[in-house]
Amino acid sequence: SLHAQANRLAHYLRDKGVGSDVKVAIAAERSPQLLIGLLA
């Protein structure tokens, strides 16, 4: 599901040391993956 994939990406980013104070660039065409990145 969309929620599960966004949650998985969010956990991955946190494991890499990305916190809420860090800006992450997303380069993607309009797709489900773009939405997942925005939600994560």
Image (tube, rainbow, N blue to C red):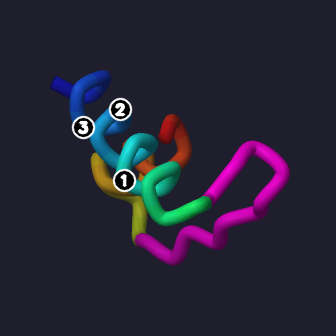
Q: Position of residue 15 (x, y in %)?
A: 44, 54
* Mark 1 or mark 3: whose residue is earlier in sequence: 3
- Which residue occupies 30% across, 23% down? 3
Tell me how far mark 1 sits from mark 2, CA to CA: 9 Å
Tag 1: amino acid: Tyr
Q: Secondary structure at mark 3?
A: helix
Q: Which residues are magenta?
A: 18-28
Q: What residue did someone put label 3 on?
A: 5
User: Would residue 14 appear left or right of 11 to someone viewing this image?
Assistant: right
User: Would residue 32 appear left or right of 13 to someone viewing this image?
Assistant: left
Tell me how far mark 1 sits from mark 3, CA to CA: 11 Å
Above or below for 24 versus 9: below
Task: Check disc 1: other Cα within 10 Å, few if <14, some if 14-19, many if 20+.
Answer: few
Q: Nearer the viewer, residue 15 or 6?
A: 15
Residue that lies at the very extreme toward the bottom in this rendered image = 27
- Which residue occupies 48% across, 64% down? 16
Do labels 3 and 2 touch, CB within 8 Å? yes
Q: What residue did someone put label 1 on?
A: 12
Do labels 1 and 2 touch, CB within 8 Å? no
Q: Secondary structure at mark 1?
A: helix
Magenta stretch, main secondary structure class: loop
Q: Position of residue 35 (x, y in %)?
A: 43, 44
Q: What residue did someone put label 2 on?
A: 7
Tag 2: amino acid: Asn
The quarter holding residue 4 reads top left
Tag 3: amino acid: Gln
